[in-house]
């Protein structure tokens, strides 16, 4: 019976993607048919600039640093230097990049606000995104390159970037600010490599993600894909690739239903496969979907509105905080790339209700990795660094109940801020028009109030 339930939910997931594709594509088709309604492509000077170029564009100095992790990934960090200033390390979320901290510009973006306050600002990029797609011996064309999840990011990427910042600045500690997966990876690091607690003055979690049982976003349907995906494409050992995912979902449904009369249109499935899952043959959620998505969404104002609403479906509706003039900019920098295994790890969190390490769905493999048939839970008691949680009631990904559960397990929680806006969503923490007033003022106030000995 579980198989039938799984097929049902996989089918629902595919249909959701189909609906999204129809909503996205239909306006562009209509635009072709009625040229008088097409007001032309939307452009913005920041759309195609890199993070360091955006920083320079606004008149700030920028540096680019390269860091090699213990397992050979070459990461990129962008910096707005302020020698002598207290270092602040900003870490982006899933499928995002360092650009998220500067896209809204001076006086609005957190990186610029911190720089204006005299802080030495560093922005990290996780393995696999557009800025960190190099390795000392692996190519992005290798399956093995993409064999990582956010557990690896926390234990290896975050630690490497913290060490680099402290080495360059000669400070013994830094402030850490994470958004979404940037918070998840910090909890992983602080619980599994506890000596790094001593290297952080305080951590600020914007849209904290650890427990996800109450996730309201449509991405919760991926929880039904996760074990199916692993079974159909092989385990995640050695970066096994989920090739031809759409065709395999189609085949799986046929195998269990015995007919294909009620299947979604095969051509539509293949179209979605090409657009939304391009590159998954190597276990990657590749940045190549960025260009066709961007071109579609900026084709005209109608398409732009459709794309904006599609983002609201995923993250939570909040039109008031969305600067519509920057939608082409956001789409020009997101999605920035990651691995399928990262997505699957989150799917496991939603399904299990636990905050724990990656499940290989094999007692033998779990035993080899963890000396346990089930993946171990992260020990929140090991996180001794002062933590400030910033969350919202309309966040479709980081639900209030899940954040409250996290808070109860943190031994050194110094602040909990429920954003004073009932419609505040997941992406408002980085892109929201009123983020400086509703979130960043509180963050910086806490930074200033934390006692630091003279160094």
Image (cartoon, rainbow, N blue to C red):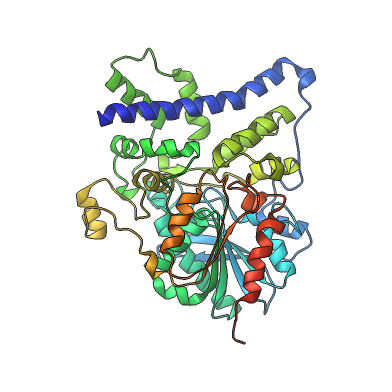
Q: Seen from this angle, which residue lies furthest bottom?
A: 454
The correct choice, above or below, for 134 with respect to 426 in the image is below
Residue situated furthest left in the rendering = 364
Where residue 155 sits, quadrant-wise, is bottom left
Say above or below: 395 vs 65. above
At 48% across and 68% down in the image, what residue appears?
160
Dividing the picture into quadrants, the one containing residue 28 is top right
Location of residue 7 in the rendering, given as x and y in whole percent from the top left corner: 33, 27
Q: Is residue 422 visible?
A: yes
- Quadrant of the frame with the C terminus: bottom right
Quarter of the N terminus within the rendering = top left
Give the image location of residue 197, x and y in percent. 46, 73
Q: Is residue 328 left or right of residue 69?
A: right
Going 23% across and 51% down the picture, which residue do you hit? 365
Compared across the picture, whether 62 is left or right of 128 comes to right
- Taking the image as shown, residue 34 lies to the left or right of residue 390, namely right
Q: Is residue 250 above or below residue 305?
A: above
Q: Is residue 445 left or right of residue 379?
A: right
Q: Please count the marks in the image.
A: 0
Q: How far across and down, in percent of the image, does residue 273 sit?
A: 47, 30
* Residue under the point 42% across and 49% down: 146
Residue 73 visible (yes or no)? no
Q: Nearer the viewer, residue 154 or 144?
A: 154
């Amino acid at each position: 019976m579980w198989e039938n339930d799984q097929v049902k939910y996989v089918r629902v997931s595919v249909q959701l993607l189909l609906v999204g594709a129809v909503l996205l594509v239909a306006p562009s088709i209509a635009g072709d048919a009625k040229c008088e309604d097409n007001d032309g492509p939307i452009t913005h000077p920041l759309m195609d600039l890199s993070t360091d170029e955006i920083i320079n564009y606004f008149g700030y100095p920028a540096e680019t640093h390269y860091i090699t992790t213990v397992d050979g990934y070459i990461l990129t960090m962008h910096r707005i230097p302020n020698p002598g200033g207290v270092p602040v390390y900003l870490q982006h979320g899933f499928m995002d990049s360092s650009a998220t901290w500067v896209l809204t510009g001076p006086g609005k973006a957190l990186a610029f606000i911190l720089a204006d306050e005299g802080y030495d600002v560093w922005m990290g990029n996780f393995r696999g995104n557009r800025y960190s797609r190099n390795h000392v011996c692996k190519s992005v064309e290798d399956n093995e390159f993409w064999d990582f999840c956010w557990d690896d990011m926390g234990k290896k990427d975050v630690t490497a970037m913290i060490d680099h910042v402290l080495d360059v600045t000669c400070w013994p500690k830094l402030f850490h600010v994470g958004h979404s997966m940037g918070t998840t990876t910090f909890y992983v690091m602080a619980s599994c490599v506890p000596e790094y607690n001593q290297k952080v003055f305080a951590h600020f979690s914007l849209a904290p993600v650890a427990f996800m049982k109450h996730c309201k976003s449509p991405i919760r349907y991926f929880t039904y894909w996760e074990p199916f995906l692993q079974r159909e494409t092989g385990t995640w050992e050695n970066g096994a690739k989920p090739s031809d995912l759409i065709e395999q979902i189609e085949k799986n449904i046929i195998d269990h239903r015995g007919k294909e009369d009620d299947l979604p249109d095969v051509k539509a499935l293949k179209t979605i496969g090409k657009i939304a899952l391009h590159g998954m043959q190597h276990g990657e959620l590749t940045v190549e979907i960025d260009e066709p998505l961007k071109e579609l969404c900026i084709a005209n104002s109608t398409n732009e509105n459709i794309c904006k609403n599609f983002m609201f479906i995923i993250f939570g509706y909040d039109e008031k905080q969305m600067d519509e003039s920057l939608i082409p900019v956001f789409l020009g920098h997101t999605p920035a790339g990651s691995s399928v295994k990262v997505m699957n790890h989150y799917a496991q969190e939603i399904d299990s209700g636990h905050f724990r390490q990656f499940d290989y769905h094999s007692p033998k493999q779990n035993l080899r990795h963890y000396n346990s048939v089930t993946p171990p839970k992260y020990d929140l008691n090991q996180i001794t660094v002062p933590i400030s949680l910033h969350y919202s009631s309309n966040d479709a990904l980081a639900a209030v109940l899940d954040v409250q559960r996290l808070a109860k397990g943190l031994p050194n929680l110094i602040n909990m801020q429920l954003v004073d806006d009932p419609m505040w969503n997941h992406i408002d923490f980085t892109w929201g028009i009123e983020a400086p007033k509703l979130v960043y003022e509180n963050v910086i106030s806490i930074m200033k109030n934390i006692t630091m000995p003279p160094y």
